[in-house]
Image (cartoon, rainbow, N blue to C red):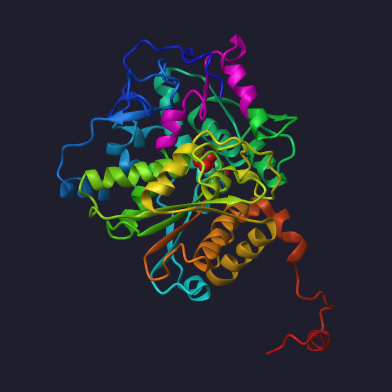
Amino acid sequence: MAVQTVQSTSASASETVDLGPAAALSCRECGERFPLGPIFACESCFGPLEVAYDLPADGPEALKKRIAEGPDNIWRYAPLLPVPADVAAHPNINPGFTKLVKADNLARELGITGELHVKDDSGNPTHSFKDRVVAIAVEAARAFGFTTLSCSSTGNLAGAVGAAAARAGFRSCVFIPHDLEQGKVVMAAVYGGELVGIEGNYDDVNRFCSELIGDPLGEGWGFVNVNLRPYYGEGSKTLAYEICEQLGWRLPDQIVIPIASGSQLTKIDKGLRELIKLGLVEDKPYKIFGAQAEGCSPVSTAFKAGHDVVRPQKPNTIAKSLAIGNPADGPYVLDIARRTGGAVEDVNDEQVVDAIKLLARTEGIFAETAGGVTVGVTKKLLDAGLLDPALTTVVLNTGDGLKTLDAVAPTTGPTATIPPSLDAFRAAGLAG
Ligand SMILES: *Cc1c(COP(=O)(O)O)cnc(C)c1O
């Protein structure tokens, strides 16, 4: 990521901003603090910035009650997010509180004897987990006075930004690699914003956006995953909050999370640690596992080689939503997997398709390729003895299979096509 322009401009950067309990930005590397603003890298060491909070002083029971009384979406956790207290009244896409599905059939198939749950984020407004991060970035964009929302995207983010901008009254202009799945392209365009295909892969798109931010052409633009990235990232914490609340304020023992940039995985860990600190869940160990596609596996490759540095790769996989060859949060993912006793693993495209079908056949959940990666890696980790089949495990499905039909279409279709007669049906041998 380009660091030549740490400070980006906005209409009201100098006014005090109200982002609820968010107190400041702090550098993940050196800890230096900065006032809340549309900045993403530390001025001293170029480390990534994250949101620091004045967390609520209510005791755990009072806080649980406040959460339970909130709306059935991520705003129920507003006391733990960088958003104003009246956020639920703003026009936004209000994602979250998606289903946590107890996946007994899949558990049986995989040989899991403990509890297995699928957190199904295909139920969000634009059918992926990206609605969570965008909803928070919209509030930051509003607070900083931006009028245009933008992003570099592997597909789902572009759709989420398009929808949120339409609803919240922003102009949007989003950037994607030119060769994405039709479902992703159509969903990114249908909300009426500008959509630009870049001739290159995601890493080229991201580099382009970093240049645009530093140029007068990008003035007044809030890039949800670049200059608003510290706020955007906080949206992923809501997955941790929901999973624990839906388990009856319990920590799962093991969570399997897909990795693109690695932001989601690192923020789920941050969310779990906050819940422990606030006393909302018991302080006990949990393990975090990361999932990648073999054709874009910079983090799992580093994990398995015992490296601390993530070497960029050129992506080639059907799991296009995870195809980031140079993941910004890769090193932090390695830290978290190692610190918690988890692992990072990858599966090939054929295993991704098999896993999509396995989840559909056992639980009636149609996942996009990223979900296939996660379920496929879960199976591989179980087979390798790295996941304990006797514990409580949560697997994330982060997107909807309708957006990646091409992945399964060649091997999925009608069992038979027949004339409308009983004789023909009898002949097809499908009765009984
Ligand atoms: C973006 C995305 C991810 C992962 O996102 P990161 O936070 O960049 O790791 C996972 N699944 C789907 C479907 C996505 O679109």
Residue 398 placement, left or right of 249: right
Report x, y in % for residue 99: 43, 58
Q: Residue at x 45, y 45 (%)?
A: 265
Q: Quarter holding the N terminus?
A: top right
Residue 252 placement, left or right of 132: left
Residue 243 in magenta? no
Report x, y in % for residue 57: 16, 37
- The one nearer the camera, 168 or 323, is 323
- The one nearer the camera, 276 or 429, is 276
Q: Residue at x 35, y 59 (%)?
A: 252
Picture mark count:
0
Question: Would residue 194 be visible to someone looking at this image?
Answer: no
**Residue 216 location, quadrant:** top right
> In the image, which residues are magenta?
206-234
Q: Quarter holding the C terminus?
A: bottom right
In the depicted structure, whether residue 293 falls above or below residue 214: below
In the depicted structure, whether residue 101 falls above or below residue 167: below
Report x, y in % for residue 345: 55, 54
